[in-house]
Image: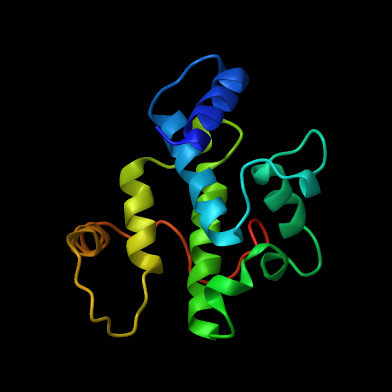
Amino acid sequence: MLKTGFFLSFAEYAYTLKVDQKSDIYSYGVVLMELLTGKRPIEPEFGEYQDIVGWVREKLGSRRGAEEVLDPDVGGHCKHVQEEMVLVLRIAVLCTARSPKDRPSMRDVLTMLGEAKPRRKSSSNSSAVVVATALAAKEKPIFSTSPGPNYL
């Protein structure tokens, strides 16, 4: 297990006093936030009593929103990549909902990731993308690609 995995499981257990699939979804959301922001789950800049989830939520409520949290070294100046990062950040926010019942299932996460995947042609054709695409084709979209006031 990753070092962050222990922390994430412990933090989730502290909030809900149980660990289950929804705890795994929460942890997955935190890992997505780490990848998108380039930050660790706990950083001094977050403040003494705040973690990456609280920091992302706080920054998303600010004027600059996602622009302030996304790692510029990942997206660079490519508008398409930045848009895709925003979509994945939305998924991360959904996965880290405070209440486990408000979190999506892993199937829904796969569907959303399939919807957020690049629309341009890719030289990579991994099986994960094929599975996510197949799920997305079978089910109706469960989230919009247009920016909404609730998440970004």
How far across and down, in percent of the image, does residue 143 sit? 45, 59
Give residue 149's quadrant in the image: bottom right
Which color scheme did the rendering employ for the protein? rainbow
- Residue occupying the far top of the picture: 17
- Res 109 seen here: yes
Residue found at x 49% / y 82%: 80
Q: Which one is nearer the viewer's eye here, 85 or 4?
A: 4
Give residue 141's quadrant in the image: bottom left
Q: Quadrant of the C terminus?
A: bottom right
135 to 77, vertically: above or below = above
93 to 100, vertically: above or below = below
Q: Which one is nearer the viewer's eye here, 99 or 82?
A: 82
Q: Is residue 60 left or right of residue 107?
A: right
Residue found at x 63% / y 57%: 151
Residue found at x 78% / y 44%: 44
Residue found at x 23% / y 81%: 123
How far across and down, in percent of the image, does residue 11 sit? 59, 26
How far across and down, in percent of the image, does residue 112 sit? 39, 58
**Number of labelled discs?**
0
27 to 76, vertically: above or below = above
- Res 141 seen here: no
- Residue occupying the far front of the picture: 3
Q: Is residue 17 left or right of residue 51?
A: left
How far across and down, in percent of the image, does residue 130 sit? 19, 64
23 to 107, vertically: above or below = above
Q: Quadrant of the N terminus?
A: top left
Q: Is residue 117 left or right of residue 135?
A: right
